[in-house]
Image (cartoon, helix red, strand yellow):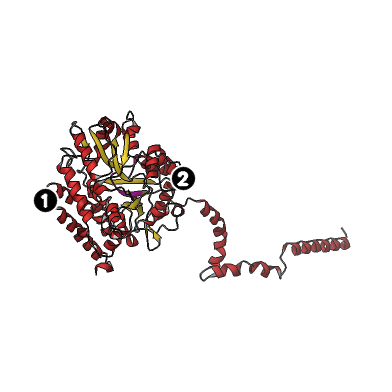
Amino acid sequence: MSVKKLVSTLLALALITGLLAACAAPTPTAAPATAVPATAAPAATTAPTKAAPATAVPATAVPAQPTATKAPVTAPVTLSYLVSQGWASDAEQALAKQFAQKTGSTIDYQVIPSDQYFNVLKTKLNSGEGPDLFGGQSGKTDLVVNYDVAKNAVDLSGESWAKTEDPQVLDQSTINGKVYGQTVWNTLGTTWVVNYNKDIFSKLNLSVPKTFADFKTACQKIKATGVTPIYEPMADGWHQVLWFAELGVQIENTTPGTADQLNTNKTTFAKSPTALLLLQQYKDLYDSGCFGDNTLSDAVADQTKTISSGKAAMTVANLTFAQSVKHDYPDFNIDSLGVFIIPLADNQVLNVNPAGPTKFIWSGSKHIAEAKQFLNFLAQTDSLQYLVDNDPNSPTLPFPGIKSKLLPSQQTFLDASTKRGVVYQTAVKYVNPQWMDIGKDIVALFTGAETPQVFLANIDKRRAEGAKAAKDPNWQ
C-alpha cells in the first residue's frame, strides 16, 4: 500500500471513531436535567427532613393504597358478650354463628343467672375489666344508675340502625342526645298480660275478668277443681315483681301526674293509696292459695310446661306467650290461650314498656369496631326477619321492613287496648335498678315478714339512695 493510501485510511478510521463516541456520550446540558428530577421537590415536602428518603417513599406508597381499601374493615377476633339468662335466644346465637362465617369473628356468650347478673356486671365494669359487649335493661334511669353509660358504653348515634329503630324504643337507650344501646327485642309483644286457658274458662263458664273481684272469683272456682289458678314462679327472684311494677299504669291512671311527682321527689310510693291497694290485693291472692302450694319454689323455666299440661289455668307472661308454648310443645293448641290485662285495683290500662334488654359496647373494649360490626349485622333486615321467623319470643321487633308473626287474636287484643300507659320501672326513676330487691320484699310480704306499708317505705328508701348516688338535684 502506498503511503498516500495508508494516510487516507487512518484518517477515515479516526473520523468514524469520533462520530461513534459523540453519539454514545450525553451532552453536557443533559446531565443536570436528569440529576435534578422534577419529582425531587414534591417528595421533599412530604418527607420529614431529608430529600434522599423522600424520593424512595413514593415508589411504594402509591401502589399500597388500593390494597388497603380492599382489606377487611376488621380482623377476626373473639368478642366477649356478658348477658343475663333469657336474653340471648337460640335464634340470636345462630345468627352469631352466621356472623362468624361471614367475618371470622366469633361471639363468646357469657350467660349469667338472672339473680346474679347485675352484681357480676357491675363488678366487671367497676374493675375496668368489662366484656366487649354487655346486656342491660334500657330505660333512662338504668342507663345512668346501673351502667353509667357515659363512662362505660360507646356512643352509637352514628350507626345506620339508630336511624331505623322505633323512636320510642331508641329513646330509652338515649342520654343527652346520644344513643348508647341497641334494643333488638320484642318490646310490644313482650307486654306482660295474664295468659289464660280458654278451655278451662269455658268449662267453668268464666268470662274475662276486668275487676279484682271477678278475678278472685275466677281463681276460687278454678281452685275448687284441683287446678292451680295462677302459675306464679318466684324462685327466679324477678317474675313476682311484674304484678307491682307493671301496674304503675293504674297508679298513674287513678292519680295523673304521680310519675312526674315521684321523679321530682314531690311524693312517695308510701303516699299512694293505689300502690297500697295493689299490694293488699296481691297478698290476698297469695293468702287465698291462688298461686298454688309451691309458688315460692316454682321456676320460670317450667312455665310453658305447666300451662301446656293444663295444671295451671293462668300465668302472667308476654302477649306472645302462646308462641313460646307451641314452640316447646308442638302438639299444643295455640288458639287455646287467650290474654287479658292484669286487673289488680280494677286496672284496665294496658301496661306498655318501650324499654327492654339492650346491647351495649363497653368503652374499654379493644374491639369496638368489630362489636359495632356485629350490631350492624343484627340490625340488617334479613337478620331481624330470621329472629322473627325462628324465635318464638320475637314475633315482632321494633324495626321496619319485617313481617310480623303476631297471632290474629293478639293483634285484635292490641287494637282493642286503646288506653295505654308506660310501666313505672321505665316511667319512674330509680325503680328498675332495685328490681331484685323488690322481689325479695314481695316474698317477705307474702310470708308475713313485711307489711305493705314497710314494703313501700323500702322502695322509697332505695329510690332516695339511688338518687343521691346519681347526684339528682331533686334529692339534694
Q: Which residues are magenta?
A: 79-89
At x 55%, y 66%, the residue is 54
Residue 464: x percent and y percent? Answer: 22, 63
Q: Which of the pair 439/455 is nearer the observer?
A: 455
Q: Is residue 84 magenta-colored?
A: yes
- Residue 376: image x %, image y %? 44, 50
Residue 367 occupies quadrant? bottom left
Query: What is the crowding at mark 1: few (fewer than 14 residues within 10 Å), some, or many (at least 20)?
Result: few
Kindly state the secondary structure of the residue where label 1 is placed: loop
Give the class, few, some or many, for how many residues have Cα within 10 Å of label 2's Cα (few <14, many ≥20).
some
Can residue 407 be seen at all in this image of the molecule?
Answer: no
Q: Quadrant of residue 208?
A: top left
For residue 86, above or below residue 264: above
| Tags 1 and 2 touching, CB below 8 Å | no
| Left or right position of 400 against 35 | left
Q: Amino acid at mark 2?
A: Thr
Q: Which residue is mark 2?
A: 381
For the residue marked with disc 1, what is the amino acid? Ala
Instruction: Please tell me which residue is depicted at 17% across the width and 43% down the height of the picture.
Output: 286
Q: Is residue 16 above or below residue 51?
A: above
In the foreground, 330 or 123: 330
- What residue is at 64 percent from the left and 69 percent from the top? 36
Percent x, y of residue 302: 24, 37
> Which of the 4 image quadrants contains residue 363?
bottom left
Distance of mark 1 from mark 2, alpha carbons?
Answer: 51 Å
Quadrant location, the C terminus: bottom left
* Numbered badge on residue 449: 1
Q: Residue at x 71, y 65 (%)?
A: 26
